[in-house]
Image (tube, grey):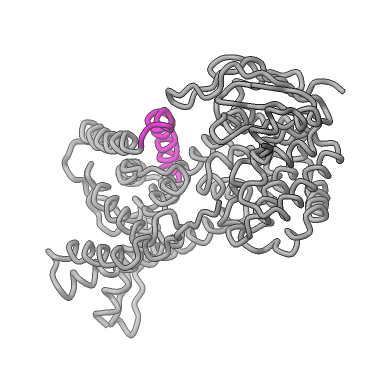
Amino acid sequence: MGEMLAVKNINVFYGSIHAIRDVSFHVDEGEIVTLIGANGAGKTTTMHAISGLLKPKSGEIIYCGQTISKMEAHKIIRLGLAQVPEGRRVFSGLTVQQNLMLGAYTRHDGKEAIQNDFDMVYDLLPRLKERRSQSAGTLSGGEQQMLAIGRALMCRPKMLLLDEPSMGLSPLLVKEIFKIIRDVNRNGVTVLLVEQNAKMALEIANRAYVLETGTIKMEGEATELANNIEVRKAYLGAQ
Amino acid sequence: MQFLSYLISGISLGSVYALIALGYTMVYGIAKMLNFAHGDIIMIGSYVIFFAFGGFGWNPILSVVVSMVVCTILGTVIERVAYRPLREAPSLAVLITAIGVSYLLQQVAQLMWSPDPKSFQSIVAGAGLKPLELFGGKLTISAEAIVTIIACVVIMVALTAFVNHTVPGHAMLAVSEDRGAAQLMGVNVNATIALTFAIGSALAAVAGALLCSSYPTLSPTTGAMPGIKAFVAAVFGGIGSIPGAFLGGVLLGVIENLSKAYISTQLSDAIVFLVLIVVLVVKPTGLLGKKINVKV
């Protein structure tokens, strides 16, 4: 199992705000790695730096042996690195089917292969199938999250970045979404998961990093961190 | 019969507004900017036809195609040179740049072709089309009006099909809804915006050819007023909406023409704007504008 993604000492600015300071971490092929932290810790900024929506000022991001820190976002996805953005960001005016079609935007391997993946996504997320011709704006929060995941899977990613997939969902739906993430991973997709819901994230992850005010404060095996006193106090609500 | 004649010429004028409004509304929807130089591209396109058809005596259809090519290149060059560097800039900076580009085009046209109005030969008449006489000669519809209305409807249908049923069309819809998410799908935002300018500018060339065929004087400021009216039409119909541009353009043309005929020639523009204000008070997003609900 080789290293799939390596983030090396990146610094990212939001205007004049130094949002990410010297952050380094890595994700190995086949893993689920989670980045936990409070609101404003810099989780989404880190994700945007990887997917190319933000450019780091310094440092390097290497994906499958290729430096991607200066690459444009629409080229990075062509390497099989897909992001499910925070707040789902589905195209609300388009139908479920059209959203999934846009997920396959970069593919040129023929209608049949794409149709197979439609079947695969509808198999994994049967609720989307029922609503395929409905406009995405009319879906519930949980269904929109499923659509966002399904849309990202349509490009056949090798690695999936998930930004707060549990946000605003009921506990039952959170469970369902996390089960889906685990299934996706079992199908061979490497996962980097950013979460505020540390409990759930640590349950499914192999390894974890704790991000605080723009720097990595702790790292380790997920089970190890879940038992760490500091982590339990700060993120798991232990007394 | 008189009324019918005013109505038809209103629809024809409105069809020209609609074609121009499409350029405004698509660029606004996708690049989130108002391209105030759009009207002046019409003017440049009309000069191209004036020289190609009137001057060199080229075939009218060939002249229009050449004008479309010139306008497409001009529109994409303007986007590349003037607007793309400002993609992350505040919208006010972009707006002022667009006004600057508009004046630049007008001044360049003045320097090259003098401010004196030129008399434009109708390309429709040049193609040998005759006016249509109905009810035993009681109602005459000009060939220009017929061609304008047909061209507008054909272009509307084609454009709607392109946007809704092709991959680049879907990319446009995606960029207009959420630029960042579209990038994450692999859509090249700069290329999509350039394509939008190319389409809008090609339509401006067609609009220029039809406008100057019906109202045959051409000067460097020819595009300014129709450009503003078309912008009003786009807002009227709901800016960002393609059917809205069509509806807004046609209604605007009809209202303008009927006010000229039955109320007052001087007041017709004031009446147009009054209707716009009333519509915006009642429905701030325009007639077909969508209110977007964001679910978090």
In the image, is residue B49 above or below residue A75?
below
Q: Between residues B56 and A138, which one lies in front from this camera angle?
A: A138
In the image, is residue A129 above or below residue B134?
above
In the image, is residue B235 above or below residue B110?
below
Task: Kindly give the residue lying farthest to the bottom in the view shown.
Answer: B135
Residue B53 in the figure: left or right of residue B198: left
From the image, give the main secondary structure of the stretch colored magenta.
Answer: helix
Q: Between residues B151 and A121, which one lies in front from this camera angle?
A: A121
Residue B235 in the figure: left or right of residue B119: right
Q: Position of residue B144 (x, y in %)?
A: 34, 63
Is B291 part of what is drawn in magenta? Answer: no
Is B71 part of what is drawn in magenta? Answer: yes
- Image point 44% across, 26% down: which residue? A15
Q: What's drawn in magenta, residue-wise? A: B65-90
In the image, is residue A28 above or below residue B153?
above
Q: Between residues A109 and B288, which one lies in front from this camera angle?
A: B288
